[in-house]
Amino acid sequence: MKQYKFILSGGGTGGHIYPAIAIANELKSRFPDAEFLFVGAQDKMEMQKVPQAGYKIKGLWISGIQRRLTFDNSLFPLKLLASLLKSRTIIREFKPDVVIGTGGFASGPLLQVAAIAGIPTVIQEQNSYPGITNKWLSKKANKICVAYENLERFFPKNKMILTGNPVRQDLIDIQSKRAEAIQFFNLDSNKKTLLVLGGSLGARRVNQLIEKELKNLLSQNVQVIWQCGKLYFEDYKKYNEGDVQVMAFIEKMDLVYAAADIVISRAGASSVSELCIVGKPVIFIPSPNVAEDHQTKNAQAIVDRKGAIMLKESELDSQFGLVFEALLKDQGKQNQLCENIEQLAKPEATKQIVDEIVKLIK
């Protein structure tokens, strides 16, 4: 049997890295002898996270275009050229059978070079509003795996397959892990647990909100697991006592979801897909600082199906206390949100994406 070789590229945020790792893990389970190489941006978090997951990675000197005039922007043409040349060397030496991109700047030059070399390429778009890199690559890609419907205005219809987003397989059936989770995080099973997720780097406005509301939350017999992000851990670790656990990053996501009764989260595509699978009551606070405001669009897609609550940052000061307290007291509403969000889950996404990749190599 032929030994296959796969290159995966995606990064900048956890939302691009974890789908790539999930796809690699599924490919590895089907082709145990296959060789894998990841390509990322050389100073971004994928350079740590990918080796932790057990894969080799090479870095490109690339970053995005800032919306304002900066020194980095003036370097962009040089970085792009350097990345295209290095991508060409990587492709020529590794000789992949397929190249898979999950978004982020590093996947741009790499997939472009692969397509020119005649190597099949697959892109996986997590958002309801695609990023610049994937829109640019879609013209030459063989297949485009998407998580939302109605993306024909961005991508060629004949290449699109609606698969959903790849998520960690350990998130499927977390119900059975609740007792283990409560023990692992040393929680009180008689109190409701609020899980606050600010994304891998953190969310300043969400952190400010929790700091302001902490006393009020604790007075309602709530215990808090607060993932504040590595950029903010030093500012908020002082609250780490009693019924509050402050963390920069959570390794055991399956257990933390199993322990949670209510979740407050940003609405990045990967987070939204995970929350559909775990089926918990969610209050989304979309980040307004992302391209095309796609977090608001991601959250709105769930809210439209009565699967979550959304609060915009501008509404937090006036609305949060009322909305949270109403949800906490209304078990019927919590159950309804859980049921509705679970209807939107696509637990087979990773397998479906890999099925499409396999068709290209057979």
Image (tube, helix red, strand yellow):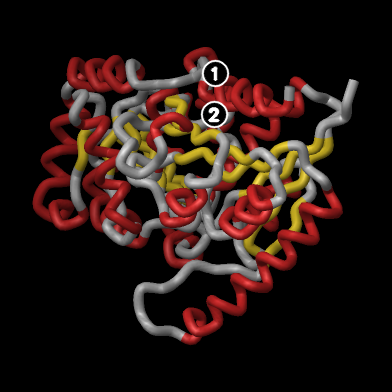
Of mark 2 and mark 1, the one earlier in the sequence is 1
- For mark 2, what is the residue? 254
Is 94 situated above or below 149?
A: below
Q: Evaluate if marks 2 and 1 touch, with contact meaning CB atoms under 8 Å apart.
A: yes
* Quadrant in which the N terminus appears: top right
In the picture, measured across the screen, residue 344 lies left or right of residue 41, that is left
Amino acid on which disc 2 is placed: Asp
* Quadrant in which the C terminus appears: top right
Question: How many marks do you count on the picture?
Answer: 2
**Point 14% across, 38% down: residue:** 323
Q: Secondary structure at mark 2?
A: helix
In the picture, measured across the screen, residue 84 lies left or right of residue 4, that is left
Q: Quadrant of residue 22?
A: top right
- For mark 1, what is the residue? 177
Residue 237 appears anywhere in the view = yes
C-alpha gap between disc 2 and disc 1: 8 Å
Q: Which residue is more in the foreground, 267 or 196?
A: 267
In the picture, measured across the screen, residue 307 lies left or right of residue 322, that is right
* Position of residue 4 measured from the top left corner of the image (x, y, whole percent): 82, 32
**Point 49% across, 86% down: residue:** 71
* Position of residue 129 measured from the top left corner of the image (x, y, whole percent): 33, 45
Within-10-Å neighbours for mark 2: few <14, some 14–19, many 20+:
many
